[in-house]
Amino acid sequence: MRKTKSVKAMRDGAVILSLILSLIIPLTALAGEKKADTGQAVSITGMQFLTDTGDEALLMITGSSGGGSPKFREELVRLEGKDWLRIRMNPAILSEEKRIRLDSLIIGEVRLEHDPEEKEAVLISLELLPVMLSYSVSSVKNSSNLMVSVTNLDRKTAQTEKP
């Protein structure tokens, strides 16, 4: 799997975010997370697909905190014979771990888990279905939210190569 950053996806995600940020409603499956105990820790409160066209998926992970953007780092890992985009967010808390199966051509499952290696850290893992893709993870300015954009390069390449 090739890792590339997509500037266009980040720019498109920011435009979409500015249009619908006020309409974000946490998923019922993630509602009711406990508030941060340490003041600066982010409490993961929701997740929503903003777009999922089959060629591109844009996902927002919402959080609440005392202020500022969360720190995060992403990596591609192979677990259980599958490719995953893993995002480690800290400081962050999660009241309970969750596994959510999605009806998407790009992302198969989302896992929200406590990080066993870091105290007050949360692992957000996205199962990546296509072989060739680009992804982008960015924090939303002046908030505790993260935007994740994943683009299927296999389908885009196949569409542009047709005569």
Image (cartoon, grey):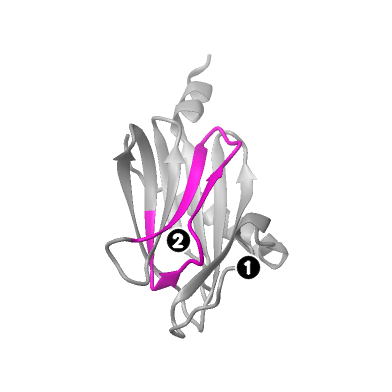
Q: Looking at the image, which residue sits at the far top?
A: 163
Could you tell me which residue is drawn at 49 percent across and 53 percent down?
148
Residue 11 locus on image (x, y percent): 52, 55
Image point (50%, 82%), residue name: 67
Q: Is residue 63 above or below residue 109?
A: below
Residue 57 numbered mark, or none: none
Crowd band around label 1 with a 10 angstrom C-alpha radius: few (<14), some (14–19), many (20+) = few
**Residue 113 covered by magenta stretch:** yes
Q: Amino acid at mark 2?
A: Ser
Image: 79 above or below 112? above
Q: Residue at x 48, y 66 (%)?
A: 94
The residue at which mark 1 appears reads as 32
Q: Quadrant of residue 34?
A: bottom right
- Indicate which label's residue lies in the foreground, 2 or 1: 1
Determine which quarter of the picture holds residue 117: bottom left
Q: Which residues are magenta?
A: 87-115
Q: Real-space Cα distance between discs 2 and 1?
A: 25 Å
In the picture, the quarter occupied by the N terminus is: top left
Mark 2 surroundings within 10 Å by alpha-carbon count, few (fewer than 14), some (14 through 19), many (20 or more): some
Q: Position of residue 163 (x, y in %)?
A: 53, 14
Task: Determine the secondary structure under disc 2.
Answer: strand
Residue lying farthest to the left in this orientation: 117
Instruction: Check disc 2 and report the residue beneath it.
Output: 138
- Is 99 covered by the magenta stretch? yes
